[in-house]
Image: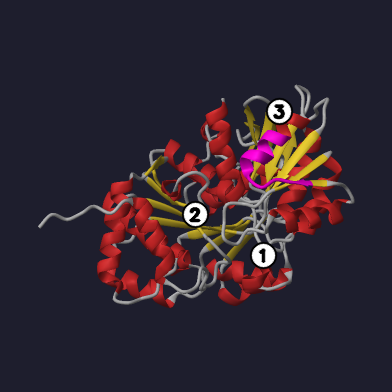
Amino acid sequence: MTTVAVALSDWLAKLETISSKEIDLGLDRVVRVLERLALPRAARVFHIAGTNGKGSTVAMLESLLRHNGFRVGCYTSPHILRFNERIRIDGVEVPDEDIIAAFEQIEALRDGEALTYFEFGTLAALLVFAKARVDTLVLEVGLGGRLDAVNAVEPTAGIITNIALDHCEWLGDNIAAIAVEKAGIMRSEKPVIFSAREMPPAIIDRAAETGAKLLAAGRDFDWHAEGDTWSWRGATHSFEGLARPSLAGEHQLANASGVLALIEAAGLEGLLKPGTISASLQRVRLEGRLQKISANGNWIVDVAHNPDAARVLAAALRADAHAGQTVAILGMLDDKDVEGVVAHLAGEVDHWIAVAADSQRAIGADELGRRVANASNAACLVADSLVAAMDRAQELTNADDRVLVTGSFYLVGPALNQLYSRR
């Protein structure tokens, strides 16, 4: 009898049906399946949590570790163009066949556990990394920290990038409650870095309760921008004249600083050499983060999807001087703070176009357009498709203008596909 191979796309569709809930926070299911998999432990495991900047932090840490000869497995979410982006070994996306093989093995051992899409993907990544015998895991927390599937793996150390209001339906509607969830990655006697200079008191309290070794930006380490370079100081090291990260935006210095603090705290001080730091941060590439593309116009795509990320995006737009106007194509999910995002961006946007993002949880274009118009006190066009929105944006712009696409991973990904095909 011939076995018919199941395509990755079919597997991904199946994963959406196993659990009745898209998000079902809790570690019990993942822990039980992990025990059945009996995977060997990697030499080092780093958890990356926080509201914004996790993907950038993972990419910088990955680059620095790889530059020093470590064999690194990275797990991130969500993806922008392909599911394979979520699982990388030494900077290379894992091929379909390896992911499918992991899915098949997990399915054989699942024994009725109603794993969510994210939990199944997390387990698959861990299995792929174990088979490849990577020595270092860099695991991005998907949602929160305390009950996220990634937290089923014991970390060596971790980073919390920052705390802001997002995913309030699951994490709580205030900074203190969200901070407690993010702090769930803390472990007794193990380092945890807080990368932002503004730290909620709940982080300090949780570190004291757990016995984690908390290292805080502005207190235990710090950084300063110096024109085209930047400087960093830690507990035992300090550097000046470092090359800026290749990722655009002043906020990336906070992410890079947190990475250096983690390396120092994790006992890997030998990696902290100025030339190595500059070279590794300069080679980082990450789609959808203040990414500029020339494709029959000047385009900027950014995955900002909450007010804090929009604030950072607005600052970057102001710093990026241009002669013309800015047209924004916005698509967001139904659990996001549309008004908060628009409030930060309104001063930088001359024309708005609303469109539905590519997700079942997307806000409809008409409803989004109404909310954008009310929040910005300006007209907002409504497009019935992304292609129509992009075409309309091109009609509204000339060579001096720019088009911003933002609001969701589920808008930026399809937009990038369109832009790449138009170049």
| Image side of residue 146 versus residue 319, left or right | left
Q: In terms of depth relative to the viewer, which is nearer, 420 or 67?
A: 420
Marks 2 and 3 sit apart, C-alpha to C-alpha, by 29 Å
Earlier sequence position, callout 2 versus callout 3: 3
Q: Amino acid at mark 2?
A: Ala
Image mark for residue 228: 3
Whether the residues at callouts 2 and 3 have beta carbons within 8 Å, the answer is no
For marks 3 and 1, give the one nearer the viewer.
1
Residue 211 x, y percent position in the rendering: 56, 72
Secondary structure state at the residue bearing disc 1: loop
Instruction: Using the rendered image of the protein, determine whether residue 349 is visible from the camera's viewpoint.
Output: no
Q: CA distance from mark 2 to mark 1?
A: 36 Å
CB under 8 Å between callouts 3 and 1?
no
Lateral position of residue 405 relative to residue 409, left or right: right
Query: Is residue 400 rendered to the left or right of residue 23?
Result: right
Q: Residues within 10 Å of mark 1 (few under 14, many from 20)?
A: some
> Vertical placement of 103 versus 245: above or below?
below
* CA–CA distance in space, label 3 to label 1: 38 Å
Q: Amino acid at mark 3?
A: Asp
- Horizontal arrangement in the rendering, residue 35 relative to residue 363 (left or right): left
Category of crowding for the residue at label 2, using alpha-carbon neighbours closer than 10 angstroms: few (below 14), some (14–19), many (at least 20): some
Describe the colour scheme in one phrase: secondary structure
Q: Amino acid at mark 1?
A: Asp
Q: In the picture, which quadrant includes the C terminus?
A: top right
Q: Which quadrant, please, contains the N terminus?
A: bottom left
- Which residue lies under the disc numbered 1? 335
The magenta-colored residue range is 381-392
Estimate how packed mark 3 is, as few (under 14), some (14 to 19) or many (20 or more) residues with alpha carbons within 10 Å.
few
The answer to which of marks 2 and 1 sits earlier in the sequence is 2
Tag 3, which secondary structure?
loop
Which sits earlier in the primary sequence, circle 3 or circle 1? 3
